[in-house]
Amino acid sequence: MAAAVAAVAAAALGRGLRPSPSAWQLRGPLAGRSRLLCPAACGGGAPAAAAASHQSGAGEGERYCMELLRKRDYEGFLCSLLLPAECRRSAFALRAFNVELAQIKESVTQKTIGLMRIQFWRQAVEDMYHDNPPQQPVAVELWKEKNMDDRAYRDIGELEAYAENTQSAILYLTLEMLGVKDLHADHAASHIGKAQGIVTCLRATPFHASRGKVFLPMDICMLHGVSQEDFIRRNQEKKMRDVIYDIASQAHVHLEHARSFRKNVPVKAFPAFLYTAALEDYLNKIQKVDFDIFHPSLHRKSTLLPLHLYIRSWKKTY
């Protein structure tokens, strides 16, 4: 498994479409913005119970990974809890390493220092190939150097390509941990990873805008006549909502496409795709606030998310 982690991590090192007719297109003076249906609620708090049970037997390194995920990638933490027991520890390590790499950009003020930290992790992966891993949580994917550039994505395709090389890479490795080697599962992982990357970009927009930076695809912003400065100063509210609608719709398209051939995906692969519940939750919430990316409700944790995840795990679906 360590070799597989290193292989995917090393491979990852380096860095406008519209939806088909659906509720996501019902915008306008008559149709308004319709809401997507939320999953039904029933059952109990199994993820929390699993967390307590699993953490009691965890080693120091595993506890570190779990706590890091709980604080910085709560949805990933919940999804990892619902993986088969034999895969869970590796999943925590993979996602924790992803968090460590992802927060480099936010924790440094000089690009040079950030690149030095990336070089540290590059060397860590190299050491894994020589059976001499560093005393750090084993990880997932490697951050790309060009992600240190403070520029927006040129177009939605570049954002999707980045998501494929990062979020989808995590899913590919999770499938490997589950022992799944299936073309349809890989296809689903590709689309779900792209949806997750797009949603992550949207969720981070308020934080980045507060620091004077915007990474939303420039082609969609230009299409609606919106500049980065508009997002920073929160000007042209309606046009900004149109930009967010287009980007969120693309995430929705990927999510629905991944589900369109669900019958062909082995059931054994479904635990890897539980994150779709978190993606759907965010897309539902942003639609309910009419695609206002700065709405306070988007920054609150969903109290029903653990329940929704458990239900999907129990039903063996995604």
Image (tube, rainbow, N blue to C red):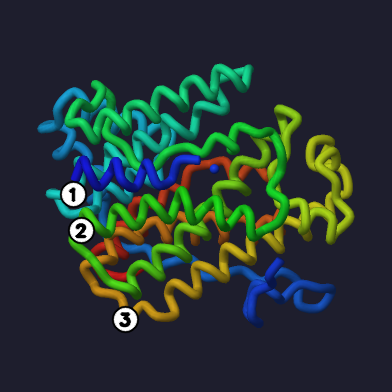
Depicted 264 relative to depicted 53: above or below? below
**Which quarter of the image is occupied by the C terminus?**
bottom left
Q: Amino acid at mark 2?
A: Leu
108 is higher (above) or lower (below) than 144: above
Is 107 on the left or on the right of 263, as rendered?
right
| Residue type at tag 1 | Cys
In whole angstroms, how far apart are the C-alphas of marks 2 and 1? Answer: 7 Å
Location of residue 95 in the rendering, given as x and y in whole percent from the top left corner = 35, 40
* Separation of marks 2 and 3 at Cα, in angstroms: 17 Å
Q: Earlier in the sequence, mark 2 or mark 1?
A: 1
Q: Secondary structure at mark 2?
A: loop
Residues at circles 2 and 1 in contact by the CB criterion of under 8 Å: yes
Residue closest to the far left: 57
Which of the two discs, 3 and 1, labels the residue nearer the N terminus?
Answer: 1
- Residue at position x 57%, y 62% from top? 251
- Location of mark 2 (residue): 178
Quarter occupied by the N terminus: top left
The numbered mark at residue 264 is: 3
Of 262 and 55, which appears nearest the observer? 262
* Label 1 sits on residue: 87
